[in-house]
Image (spheres, rainbow, N blue to C red):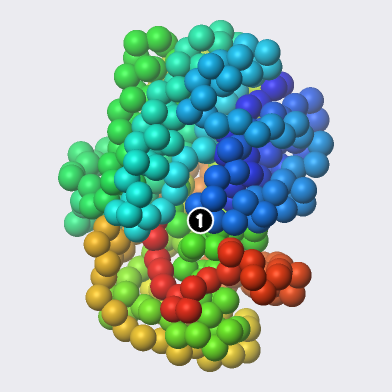
């Protein structure tokens, strides 16, 4: 089985390539544009550490002609589309990055899939941020989404609408995956668990938003990847008889106080954090909480890695990574660590 993974040098993308390539009979081709939203050296290090055995190419999904050519050459059976411009707060500063990657890039990818008859299923990354206009938890997929609080969230809602339209018009089987605050080894340096750990070790203060009243449904990377593997294996033998578009929440269905995450990090790092309370920034959500009953009913699986276990694995990796990182490494955190996004 041949699988194309976009955003393959990203956090979820590299882990996904590793898991899929390890399955007998699977051949993985990954593409990434290695943009500078954070240090591309971290992305290349992920590829080197996690993606041995797969084919990795530098290609931007907004280059529609190159993408169509690649799809025609590779004839993938499944596409896992993870390439996107991430970051809630960054969307307030650089909106055109989101228009390019998340809107034009999504249409470019959908067009490439439409014109490649070998594709049995397209899976793509959405986000818990689509619920940013909602006041009621837990979030379930049947909710009528309200006005989102950031351009990032709006771009992910638009991706779902575009995908639903293409699925209906061209009979393409598609699955949108609403990821909830993914964390773990080889993660993103702009996310709270990374910035907090680095701040603690470097004696910098941590800014805790909404005066400590923030809860997140933290989801460990292996649970995200297991879900993707299930969905790929589901179409390994035959194309789905009914071609449709649907979305799934991929979360740990257990919101945790962000202050509790800091306490776990303090214990694991054997060092106290200096915490400064602050107001909630524009676009941020007070709480995320995934209802995963649809995923459980359809696939008999839901994420279940505890925050304690996941952070233990992250800290073990992070301390090793930190010992090897150069002081001038731009992926290191700013003077005041803050979070949480997504």
Residue drawn at point x = 62 percent, y = 51 percent: 40
Q: How far across and how far down the image is residue 274, in percent?
A: 45, 89
Q: Quadrant of the C terminus?
A: bottom left
**One can see residue 289 in this view:** no
Residue drawn at point x = 71 percent, y = 21 percent: 1
Is disc 1 surrounded by few (<14), some (14 to 19) or many (20+) residues within 10 Å? many
Would you identify the image quadrant in which residue 281 lies?
bottom left
In this view, 30 is above or below 195: above
254 with respect to 311 (left or right): left
- Residue where numbered disc 1 is placed: 182
**One can see residue 52 in this view:** yes
Q: How far across and how far down the image is residue 226, in percent?
A: 61, 44
Residue drawn at point x = 19 percent, y = 57 percent: 135
Q: How far across and how far down the image is residue 284, in percent?
A: 29, 61
Residue drawn at point x = 44 percent, y = 44 percent: 85
- View extreme (front): residue: 328
Query: Toward the viewer: 213 or 304?
Result: 213
In this view, 69 is above or below 317: above
Give the secondary structure at mark 1: strand
In this view, 251 is above or below 16: below
246 with respect to 122 (left or right): left
Query: Toward the viewer: 320 or 167?
Result: 320
Q: How far across and how far down the image is residue 133, in percent?
A: 21, 51
Would you identify the image quadrant in which residue 42 lies?
bottom right
130 with respect to 48 (left or right): left
């Amino acid at each position: 089985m041949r699988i194309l993974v976009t955003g393959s040098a990203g956090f979820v993308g590299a882990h996904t390539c590793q898991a899929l390539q390890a399955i007998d009979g699977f051949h993985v081709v990954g593409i990434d544009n290695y943009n500078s939203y954070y240090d591309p050296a971290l992305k290349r290090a992920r590829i080197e550490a996690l993606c041995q055995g797969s084919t990795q190419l530098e290609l931007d999904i907004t280059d529609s002609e190159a993408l169509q050519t690649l799809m025609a050459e590779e004839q993938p059976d499944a596409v896992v589309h993870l390439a996107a411009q991430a970051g809630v707060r960054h969307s307030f500063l650089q909106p055109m990055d989101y228009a390019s990657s998340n809107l034009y890039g999504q249409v470019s990818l959908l067009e490439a899939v439409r014109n490649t008859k070998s594709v049995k299923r397209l899976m793509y990354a959405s986000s818990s941020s689509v619920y940013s206009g909602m006041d009621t938890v837990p979030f379930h997929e049947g909710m009528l989404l309200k006005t989102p609080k950031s351009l990032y969230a709006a771009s992910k809602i638009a991706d779902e609408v575009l995908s639903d339209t293409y699925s209906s018009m061209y009979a393409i089987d598609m699955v949108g995956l609403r990821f909830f605050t993914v964390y773990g080894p080889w993660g993103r340096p702009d996310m709270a668990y990374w910035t907090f750990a680095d701040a603690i070790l470097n004696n910098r203060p941590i800014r805790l938003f909404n005066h400590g009243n923030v809860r997140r449904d933290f989801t460990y990377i292996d649970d995200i990847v297991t879900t993707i593997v299930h969905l790929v294996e589901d179409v390994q033998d035959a194309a789905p008889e009914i071609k449709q578009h649907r979305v799934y929440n991929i979360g740990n269905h257990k919101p945790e106080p962000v202050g509790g995450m800091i306490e776990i990090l303090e214990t694991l790092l054997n060092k106290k954090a200096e915490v400064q309370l602050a107001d909630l920034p524009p676009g941020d959500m007070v709480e995320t909480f995934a209802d995963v009953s649809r995923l459980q009913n359809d696939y008999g699986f839901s994420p279940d890695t505890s925050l304690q276990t996941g952070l233990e694995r992250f800290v073990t990796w992070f301390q090793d990574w930190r010992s090897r990182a150069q002081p001038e490494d731009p992926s290191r955190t700013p003077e005041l660590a803050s979070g949480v996004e997504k």
